[in-house]
């Protein structure tokens, strides 16, 4: 283990923005090296990342932003 990440994931987590969860998703999809990731289509990478880290929206942020705009007539 290195920094709490299993050995088979350490190469992928060297990349900025790839944490253990994302590296595990790539590994599960049989993308285990940086070279393999480099040859993977953008569409496939997007599918893998969406399944690993679901997209969420901070509704309260947008509500507060809209409220601020409305109050200040911006």
Image (cartoon, rainbow, N blue to C red):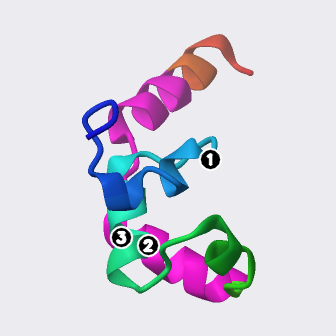
Residue 63 in magenta? yes
Residue shown at the point (40%, 85%) measured from the top left: 29
- Taking 68 as reference, is 10 left or right? left
Viewer-side residue, 34 vs 1: 1
Is 30 situated above or below 9?
below
Picture disc at residue 68: none
Check if mark 2's residue and mark 3's residue have beta carbons within 8 Å: yes
Find the magenta span and give its range. Answer: 42-67
Q: Earlier in the sequence, mark 1 or mark 2?
A: 1
Q: Which residue is mark 2?
A: 26
Check if mark 1's residue and mark 3's residue have beta carbons within 8 Å: no
Q: Position of residue 9 (x, y in %)?
A: 39, 57
- Taking 40 as reference, is 32 left or right? left
**Neighbour class for label 1 at 10 Å: few (<14), some, many (≥20)?**
few
Picture disc at residue 15: 1
Residue 32 in magenta? no
How far apart, in angstroms, are the residues tagged by discs 2 and 3?
4 Å
Picture disc at residue 25: 3
Is 63 situated above or below 7?
above
Is 4 situated above or below 12?
above
Residue shown at the point (44%, 24%) measured from the top left: 64
Instruction: Name the image quarter holding the C terminus.
Output: top right
How far apart, in angstroms, are the residues tagged by discs 1 and 3?
14 Å
Query: Can residue 53 be seen?
Result: no
**What secondary structure characterizes most of the magenta part?**
helix
Q: Earlier in the sequence, mark 1 or mark 3?
A: 1
Instruction: Name the image quarter holding the N terminus.
Output: top left
Residue shown at the point (64%, 86%) measured from the top left: 43
> Which image quadrant for residue 54?
bottom left
**Neighbour class for label 2 at 10 Å: few (<14), some, many (≥20)?**
many
Q: Secondary structure at mark 3?
A: helix
> Which image quadrant for residue 25?
bottom left
């Amino acid at each position: 283990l290195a920094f709490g990440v299993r050995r088979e994931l350490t190469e992928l987590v060297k990349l900025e923005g790839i944490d253990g969860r994302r590296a595990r998703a790539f590994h599960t999809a049989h993308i285990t090296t940086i070279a393999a990731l480099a040859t993977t289509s953008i569409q496939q990478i997007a599918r893998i990342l969406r399944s690993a880290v679901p997209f969420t929206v901070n509704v309260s942020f947008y509500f507060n932003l809209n409220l601020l705009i409305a109050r200040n007539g911006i």
